[in-house]
Image (cartoon, rainbow, N blue to C red):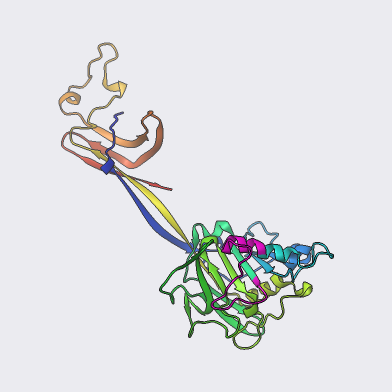
Amino acid sequence: MSFKRLDPEDFLISADSITAGAWTNNLPTLSTFFTSSVQAAGASGQYYLNVYQTGSTLDESEVQFNIAFGNSNGSGSSLYDAGIDGKSPTSTIFGQFQNIVLGDENTNFTFGTVTPTTQSFYAITVNRSKYKGSLLPGTLNLTISGSNQIQLTDNSNDITTQTFNEAGRVYQIVSGSNGSAYSGTGYTTNSGSYGLFLPDIGTILLNASALDLAGPQGAGLGTSYTTSANNPAKLFNAISASGNFVLNSQENITSDYIFIRARNAEYNYSENPSFISGSTGEVIYNNFINSPQTFITTVGLYNDANELLAVAKLSKPLKKDFTKEALIRVKLDF
C-alpha cells in the first residue's frame, strides 16, 4: 500500500442536469388514474385526494400526486365550527399555499394579469419521490375534460424574463403544449391564466375561476364553492377522463472528479509480506529490486486523520512499472 497527498489541481467539481419521467418507473406519461374509495367517501374527500397509477390496494400502487382544494372564504368543505364562518379545511389549505408560495398571508394570488375577487384553486402536488430535484419546465401537458376539453402547459418557452416568488421559479399555466401557448397569451378573457406552475416545489396551482368556466375557454367544471361540490374528485374525473398527464422531472447531479496520478517512479514496489523473507528481511526475488512491477487494483481516499473515506475499484488490475505512468479518474456523485 502506498500513500500520496493530492494537490488542489487534482480536484474538479462538475454539475450535470438529468431528466426523467415524473411518474412511477420514470415514465413521462400517466394515463391511468385511481383513488382510494375510502378516502374519497370520507370527510377529507371534500378537499383532498391521493391519486395512484393503479388500484390503491395493490402492492405495486404508489401515490403519483395529490389534489387539494383551497378557498379563501372556506367554501368547498364543511366548517370546523358551524358558529365560525369561513374557517374550514379549504381555508386552511389556502393559507398554507399563501405562506409557501407568496410568503404573506395578506397577499392574494394573481393569475396572469388577473387577481380574482374570490381566491380559489385546485392544487396538484407531485409526490416528492417522483420529481427528485424539481419539475422540468416545458414538459407539462395536462388535458382536462369537463363539459369542454382543454390542454394546459406552462409558458416557459414564451417568456424572456424569469419570475420568482417564495417557492422559487414561477410560470403561468396556459392553453397550449410543450411550454408554449397555442395563440396569444393562452389566458382566459376574464379570469387570467389557468394557474401557476411551480417546478421547484413540485406544485401546479390551477385557477378555479378559469377551470369552472363553461364555454370554449374554460373546462366547464362547474361551481367549486359549495360544500357538496367534491372539488378534488371533480378535477380527478376531468383528468382521468382524458388519460393524458405528461410531466418530466429534473435533477442536478454534482460530481467530484479526483485525478489520481501514478508517475513512472511511483507505486512500483509492493509491501506484500510475501515479497520479503521472514527470516532475513531480504527481498526474495532479485528482479523486484531493479525491475519491480505491481498491479493496481484499488484506490482508497483518506483524510488527514488517515481515515478511509471512499474506495474505488478498477475493472481489472492495472500493471505498473518504471516504464509506465497511469492516470486514474475517480468520480463521486452526490
Horizontal and vertical percent for residue 254? 40, 51
Horizontal and vertical percent for residue 218? 62, 83
Residue, far right: 83
Horizontal and vertical percent for residue 152? 55, 77
Residue, far bottom: 215
Q: Residue at x 72, y 70 (%)?
A: 73
Magenta stretch secondary structure, dominant:
loop
Residue, far top: 279
Name the residue nearer the viewer: 102 or 171: 102
Range of residues picked out in magenta: 95-121
**Residue 105, quarter of the rendered image:** bottom right
Quadrant of the image for the N terminus? top left
Q: Residue at x 33, y 41 (%)?
A: 314
Residue 125 against residue 297 in the figure, above or below: below
Residue 65 in view: no
Residue, far front: 106
Q: Residue at x 55, y 62 (%)?
A: 202
Q: Residue 119 colored magenta?
A: yes
Is 167 left, or right, of 334 in this rendering? Answer: right
Residue 329 against residue 154 in the figure, above or below: above
Give the mark count. Answer: 0
Q: Residue at x 27, y 27 (%)?
A: 270
**Residue 37, quarter of the rendered image:** bottom right
Is 15 left, or right, of 175 in this rendering? Answer: left
Is 264 left, or right, of 43 in this rendering? Answer: left
Horizontal and vertical percent for residue 128? 57, 57
Name the residue nearer the viewer: 278 or 81: 81
Residue 298 in view: yes
